[in-house]
Image (spheres, grey):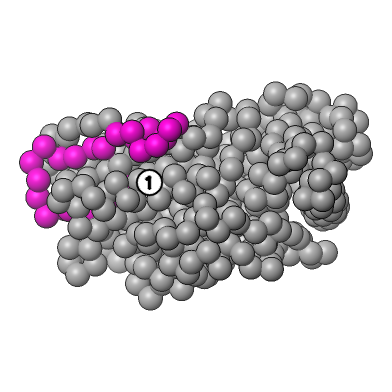
């Protein structure tokens, strides 16, 4: 439990930044009776509409949830928000939900978000629509909102590795607000972070350099959860990741030229796989093992404690090491499987020679080269925005980065102490049982307060 002690020490070190506001614990809410209605938005695009049985002022505000590749028909946000009086549409796009197949067509998925927004706009009693992006949903929804607010020009810039086909995403209806509740850095950035830096031959996962293996004890890995990688290894690993990513992009661009010239393996697209490139889970991410990496915010922000008090401070992580192993030699769980166009559209992003990440920063990433980065998309989004991070998750600093890039004049940020990426209390992170309280309630009480603030949507 050394990492837990280190976290508490970090809290003490940053206490000088803190300004504490004593607040009463969040008031309990009377759970609304909720009805559920199946909705068929399009072929392969199912949804469930959660509505309070008795309509009130909040029910005119509809929240939409969808993930880039996950099954969100029964996400915790569906029940928590509908029980607080809101209408909630929880939908799936048409991608595979196994997590092992990366068949995401980002622009098709964006158009399917539009089906949900259109449905809500036409549903009786709905006056406002707010998108709730969790994890990979933040990349999908931020891309949707950026294009909806700024037109197809937003996905046809020269900075993008591949431009959209305008007819797929033309005429999208912007939502009235957006919420990023433990967003990730974007599907493309998560794929970048997940690359095995040591792959020597892109045709096979059987050859990888042990000197670049993050699970090799010789490189600083400790199976007991106390890993702190030597700075030399971190720098060498990150440089190798950036270099491999650049090589992959160059290969993709060459294949795209051949396809467009009629000399590809197929006329429309062709298969593409990346050994040691699966971005689901903890594969090859240094910060899933070393808590000093991406382990605190760069600036002081509101941290919501279990008792409801809010402390403005540099927010340290509460997460613990995940413990994993190299999966590069596995096709099913270790290899990213996509196509040339789909990988360029959703999973590739440019880096520069200074690509690196440390305790509270990421450098050398071209946020505008991928449409799936909420950090880049936030610069084109102007509607009211709420950005929240869960301190026991390993993506929580993205909430700060999105907030800093957001063009919205009405924008808010907060962090929930001890909450995991799926919003539940992190039991392995606790020093005492129940230390973090009911983090799901803490989160959605805060969301309710933001959504229900007079003059924003009501």
Residue 56 included in the magenta stretch of the image? yes
Q: Is residue 393 magenta?
A: no
Towards the viewer: 12 or 327: 327
Q: Disc 1 designates what residue?
A: 115
Residue 264 occupies quadrant: top right
Count of marks, rendered view: 1
Q: Is residue 335 above or below residue 423?
A: above
Q: Residue at x 46, y 53 (%)?
A: 141
- Give the residues drawn in magenta, as a range: 39-64
Is residue 225 something one can see in this rendering? no
Give the percent coordinates (x, y) of residue 290.
68, 45
| Camera-side residue of 353 and 230 | 353
Residue at the location (66% across, 44% down)? Answer: 342
Q: Nearer the viewer, residue 319 or 86?
A: 86
Residue at 70%, 50% (x, y): give it: 344
- In the image, residue 227 sits, relative to residue 297, either above or below, namely above
Which corner quadrant holds the C terminus?
bottom left
How busy is the neighbourhood of tag 1: few (under 14 within 10 Å), some, or many (20 plus)?
A: many
SS at mark 1 in the image: helix
Q: Residue at x 47, y 41 (%)?
A: 67
* Drawn side of residue 394 relative to residue 62, left or right: right
């Amino acid at each position: 439990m050394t990492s837990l002690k280190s976290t508490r020490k970090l809290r003490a070190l940053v206490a000088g930044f803190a300004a504490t506001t004593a607040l009463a614990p969040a008031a309990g809410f009377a759970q609304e009776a909720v009805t559920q209605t199946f909705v068929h938005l399009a072929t392969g695009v199912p949804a469930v509409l959660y509505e309070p049985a008795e309509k009130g002022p909040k029910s005119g505000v509809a929240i939409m949830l969808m993930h880039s590749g996950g099954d969100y028909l029964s996400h915790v946000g569906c029940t928590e928000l509908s029980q607080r009086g809101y209408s909630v549409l929880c939908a799936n796009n048409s991608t595979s939900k196994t997590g092992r197949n990366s068949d995401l067509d980002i622009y098709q998925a964006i158009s399917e978000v539009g089906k949900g927004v259109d449905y809500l706009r036409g549903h009786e009693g709905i006056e406002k629509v707010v998108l709730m992006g969790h994890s990979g949903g933040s990349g999908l929804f931020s891309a949707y909102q950026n294009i909806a607010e700024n037109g197809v020009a937003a996905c046809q810039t020269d900075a993008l590795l591949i431009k959209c086909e305008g007819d797929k995403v033309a005429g999208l209806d912007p939502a009235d607000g957006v919420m990023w509740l433990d967003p990730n850095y974007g599907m493309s950035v998560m794929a970048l972070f997940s690359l095995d830096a040591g792959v020597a031959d892109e045709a096979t996962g059987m050859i990888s350099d042990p000197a670049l293996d993050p699970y090799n004890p010789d490189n600083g890995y400790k199976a007991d959860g106390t890993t702190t990688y030597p700075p030399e290894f971190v720098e060498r690993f990150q440089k190798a990741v950036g270099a491999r990513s650049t090589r992959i992009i160059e290969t993709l661009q060459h294949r795209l030229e051949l396809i467009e010239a009629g000399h590809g393996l197929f006329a429309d697209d062709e298969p593409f796989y990346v050994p040691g490139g699966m971005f689901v889970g903890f594969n090859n991410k240094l910060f899933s093992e070393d808590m000093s990496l991406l382990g605190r915010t760069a600036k002081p922000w509101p941290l919501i404690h279990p008792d409801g008090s809010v402390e403005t401070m540099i927010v340290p992580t509460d997460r613990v090491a995940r413990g994993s192993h190299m999966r590069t030699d596995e096709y099913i769980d270790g290899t990213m499987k996509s196509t040339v166009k789909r990988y360029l559209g959703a999973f590739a992003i440019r880096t520069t020679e200074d690509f690196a990440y440390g305790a509270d920063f990421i450098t050398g990433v071209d946020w505008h080269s991928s449409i799936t980065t909420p950090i880049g998309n936030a610069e084109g989004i102007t509607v009211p925005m709420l950005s929240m991070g869960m301190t026991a998750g390993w993506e929580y600093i993205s909430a700060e980065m999105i907030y800093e890039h957001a063009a919205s004049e009405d924008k808010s940020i907060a962090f929930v102490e001890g909450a995991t990426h799926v919003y539940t209390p992190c039991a392995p992170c606790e020093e005492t049982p129940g230390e973090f309280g009911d983090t799901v309630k803490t989160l959605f009480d805060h969301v309710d307060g933001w959504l229900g603030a007079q003059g924003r949507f009501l």
